[in-house]
Image (tube, helix red, strand yellow):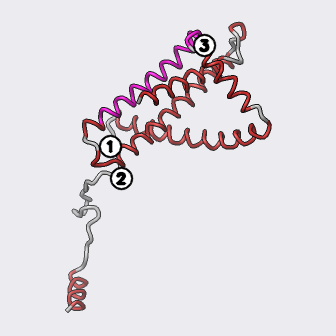
Amino acid sequence: MILQAGGYYFLASLTAVNVLNPFTESEKAPVSYAYMVLGGVVLYFYLMSKLQKSKRMISSLGNNMNAPEKEKNMKLEWALIIATLLLYVSSLVYPQIVTHKVNQWFYINIADIYDTVLLKFIFGIIGFFFLIQILFQGFNTTMKMLNLISGGTNNNPNQNHQTQSDAGFVDYEIVEDEDDAEDQQNLLN
């Protein structure tokens, strides 16, 4: 969890540095604010996609983790996400928070790697598909959260509950005619 918190810190701080870098204080224009909002939206969707992956990983562990442990992990994950988004917003308001030598070193090295001609093309293509995946996963997780908050049902296919239909049948119940059952019984005899 500590490594994940460190990764989220650098993710938020480098996103803020990247968003703030092209604009100086005198150049604050509506475009720069739109760029900041776009950076925040992409960061939010990325964090939501990470949350979805974390939920999948926890659910795949199944019986290896007890319910309080799963709940604790999810609460810690949410705390990290909220702290990361707060760090991003506060670093946009107070850029001094993220302007230090470590972030500048990371930013310069990442920019140098990205500016390599062939790598820029490859990273651009991979980044495009990665961004599309993040947006879909983040949007999906956000819609599930909004559905739960608004009181809707959670249509989770992993839940093993049965619902009764209007005809009185239970989902996944095999219904056979009496004649078919007799025919099968006669075939077995």
Q: Is residue 76 magenta?
A: yes
Q: CA distance from mark 2 to mark 3?
A: 47 Å
Question: Does residue 92 lie above or below 9 as drawn?
Answer: above
State how many labels appear: 3
Question: Mark 3 highlights which residue?
Answer: 100
Question: Mark 2 highlights which residue?
Answer: 157
Few, some or many residues within 10 Å of mark 2 (<14, 14–19, 20+): few
Question: Does residue 161 lie above or below 102 as drawn?
Answer: below
Residue in the picture at 39% in, 36% down:
145
Q: CA distance from mark 2 to mark 1?
A: 12 Å
- Left or right side of 111 for 178: left
The quarter of the image holding the N terminus is top left
Say what secondary structure mark 3 lies in: loop
Residue in the picture at 60% in, 13% down:
100
- Left or right side of 35 for 87: left
Closest to the observer, 45 or 154: 45
The quarter of the image holding the C terminus is bottom left
Q: Report the amino acid beneath label 3.
A: His
Q: Residue furthest top?
A: 26
Say what secondary structure mark 2 lies in: loop
Closest to the observer, 20 or 96: 96
Say the numbered circle drawn on residue 153: 1
Residue in the picture at 30% in, 38% down:
70
Q: Report the amino acid beneath label 1.
A: Thr
Q: Is residue 29 magenta?
A: no
Magenta span of residues: 71-97
Closest to the observer, 92 or 69: 69
